[in-house]
Image (tube, rainbow, N blue to C red):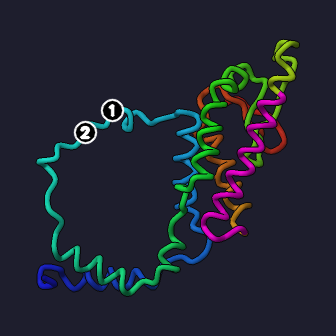
Amino acid sequence: MLKNLSWPVLSLLLGACVTINIYFPAAAAEEAAREIVRDVLDAKQPQEQQKPKQDQSAIDRPNPALVVAGRLMEMLVSQAHAAGADINIDTPAISRLRQSMSKRQRSLEPFYRSGAIGFDASGRVAIRDLKAVALKDRNRVKKLVADENRDRDALYREIARANGHPEWEADIRKTFSRIWIEEAPSGYWFKQGGSWKKK
């Protein structure tokens, strides 16, 4: 079976175990943050919305040589190092927080659009202009913002904890802070460098 797998490819696979990053996996954290933020904001990319279902008859059997190479990699790379290259966001606690934030988004959205609230530089929501909110709704907005920030703080903490690295919380927060702004719809406000800007 290994005859079909060229030595350069095999040596590349074997060399990969040397380059695994055991520090904060920034790329994996960004991917996880983007998935959660898009889910919460319901900001699906057009290609995700129009992705056709794959025809089952078109699925080929896996290449036996690649299967052997994959099993070889599993034996060579320890679980601890392999886990360092990924961010786990599939825990019951994280799912509950995502659902809570997604549900609240419907109530927050008009206030983002009016400019009453926006994203701050710490991955939280901040009140930008309370005067943009009708007097009767101001306490409701304050409560929505407080509840959202409570969930966001818990989300960053839980992602770090679920991945066995509570010390990653600040890095996870920083990553989410940037992704919230990048994924925000046009017209949302964000705070950068101490001043508010409209996207």
Residue 149 lies in the magenta stretch: yes
Q: Quadrant of residue 175?
A: bottom right
Residue 146 lies in the magenta stretch: yes
Q: Quadrant of residue 111?
A: top right
SS at badge 2: loop
Q: Which residue is mark 2?
A: 53
Residue 150 placement (x, y as % from top left):
77, 44
Decide which of 198, 32 is in the foreground and name it: 32
Q: Which residue is mark 1?
A: 50
Residue type at mark 2 is Lys
Q: Give the Cα separation between the discs numbered 1 and 2.
A: 9 Å
Residue 121 versus residue 136 in the image, above or below: below
Residue 59 placement (x, y as % from top left):
16, 53
Residue type at mark 1 is Gln
Residue 172 placement (x, y as % from top left):
67, 58
SS at badge 1: loop
Range of the magenta residues?
142-166
- Residue beneath the point at 72% across and 31% down: 189
- As drawn, the residue found furthest toward the front would be 92
- Residue beneath the point at 22% across and 43% down: 54
| Circle 2 residues within 10 Å: few <14, some 14–19, many ≥20 | few
Quadrant, the N terminus: bottom left
User: Would residue 77 appear left or right of 96 to someone viewing this image?
Assistant: left
Residue 119 versus residue 65 in the image, above or below: above
* Mark number, residue 93: none
- The number of numbered badges drawn on the structure is 2
User: Would residue 67 appear left or right of 73 to someone viewing this image?
Assistant: left
